[in-house]
Amino acid sequence: MNPESSPSTPSQYSVQAAQAAAGGKGAIQAVFDPATGQANATLLGDFLWTNVNFGEAVTEPMTPLAWSVLEFTLDDWIFLPGYATTGNIGGCPYLNISALAALYLALGRSRDDFLARLEGTLYLRLPDDVDIPRIPLNLAGIAAGLAQVARVQRKYRQGVKALPAYLAANPDSCRLLTERITATGSGRALAALWQQELKPHVKHGVWVVLGTVDYATGDTMALRRELIALLGPEDAHILMANVGAADATLPSLGPLVGLAQLARGEVSREAYLAHYGHRGPHEFEISVPRPAEDPGWLDLQLAQLRESPVDPEALLARQRQAFAAAWERLNALPARQAIGIRHRIVENARRARLREEARSEYVRDRWLVRRFAVRAGELTGLGDDVFYLTLPEVLGLLEGDASAIPTIPARRQTHLRYQALPPYPQVIRGPFDPFQWAADPRRRSDIFDAHAPLAARAPATGDLTVLAGSPAAAGRVEGLVRRLDRAEDGPQLQPGEVLVTALTDIAWTPLFARAAAIVTDIGAPLSHAAIVARELGIPAVVGCGDATVRLHTGDRVRVDGSRGTVEILNR
């Protein structure tokens, strides 16, 4: 759709309207216009936002219901009172870096110290010339912020403590709650089930995940840097891999390994779907059916596997051998250097497994929310239109308040217009209109700064033939680029090609074993693409910013996963 074809654009959704939608509180909030479904948290002030952390989980603009569910789950994940940690920009969730950095900066800590401290959580590589706008804090504001951070840290610890019970009980809990949803015969009963059982269940799960992610990432980046200094990037990457246990498949690799087992007749379709049927494309978009709901999805995956046979278990076995060899080289170092770091490698792998297992079960919780929404659509007669209401509106509708229904057509149209746009910049500062940005031929896909002429920015490497990103998985290969926008286009990827895409989620995992290397716009050493590539021994460079703009299918490139560079050899 032509961005100019509609008389209503986000630029006309004024700051005054945004503040009214936010309740006049002046804090960073979702800034959702109920009449049109437009959302733009950048209108409330000069803040720095990033979607890098969210990008792999939310790969397209969300429906209003999917966003409001995400907002509900994170409404108490607050580090600075009065400022929500997340905001909705054109249907996509972004983290408010200004709110996260405010206490650090107010206490005299540096910008670089803040970025280093949260590197494993934010996945953010911020260019030196991009400022983090400050939120001024007086002594009372600092004290309130410190108290709030202490509360968050306490909830993190409680979440980690609850993790074993959550992992053990969640599959059965979701199955039983799904049966309760299906058996519910009235809107009021379904609303009551949400308030009394579903809401606390989902809220508990999100704090388990948040706590586990914080617990699992604390030492990872420092350990990685130390291993590089001791052994070089190749061995460092190998030692940081091998996260999957010998007797269990890492959840991020489960769909790929399970698919190969299914193709060989070692597991049944029912067993595969029971283990992995909740994992698939657009996992945080609750309007999208899960693989377990769509028998055709599994048939398509099997057909693709038959056309391009891969053996992920052989790749994993090769990586285990490489790990054993790197471990021996580590043991050959002086004891004072190796003894402490060996324990940290083992502990880091254990925590990384816990992080992946917690994420997988939380995705199962999101599927539970989808089932609630589908049942709400059935009971109210709205069907799929229910996804264009917010969670409070759905609950109100179940109780008999239908006042939001007339807004659905406009919201559906807005959502379609958002989906037609290219992926938004990973970093945004200041007021941002996604439609105006998309219409600008000079736009950058990595950074938008309303205060700086981004067209004047040079590539990070200073060389137009070289892209720089995060070194995610070691190895150096040359190959032809296959640029893909969606996992559904995976059949186009030929064995030995370099997969280039904006980002990956678990739906891309079956493609990894066919690729010679992985290159992404969004990502970091702990992102999905990096973890899966390391486990399989596939070179990867992630977080390049604008790889999908500068690389095209058919380009020949050299990918160096140790240095984090992609060199364009010829076109």
Image: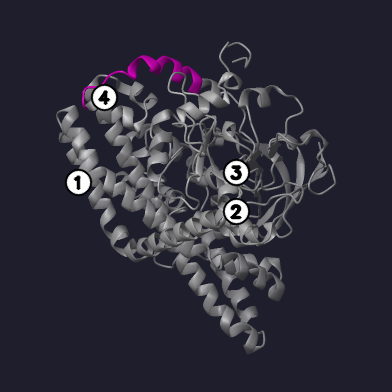
Position of residue 209 relative to residue 373, above or below, is: below
Q: Which residue is drawn at 55% across and 58% down?
A: 139
Q: Distance between the residues labelled 3 and 1?
A: 37 Å
Whichever of labels 3 and 1 marks the residue nearer the N terminus, that label is 3
Which label lies toward us, 1 or 2? 2
Which label lies toward us, 3 or 2? 2
Most common SS among magenta residues: helix
Give the x, y percent position of residue 146: 49, 60
Q: How far apart are marks 1 and 2 (CA)?
A: 42 Å
Q: Which residue in the protein does label 2 denote?
A: 101
Residue numbers of the magenta segment: 399-415
Q: Distance between the residues labelled 3 and 4?
A: 34 Å
| CB atoms of marks 3 and 4 within 8 Å | no
- Residue 50, disc: 3
Q: Is residue 545 visible?
A: yes
Whichever of labels 3 and 4 marks the residue nearer the N terminus, that label is 3
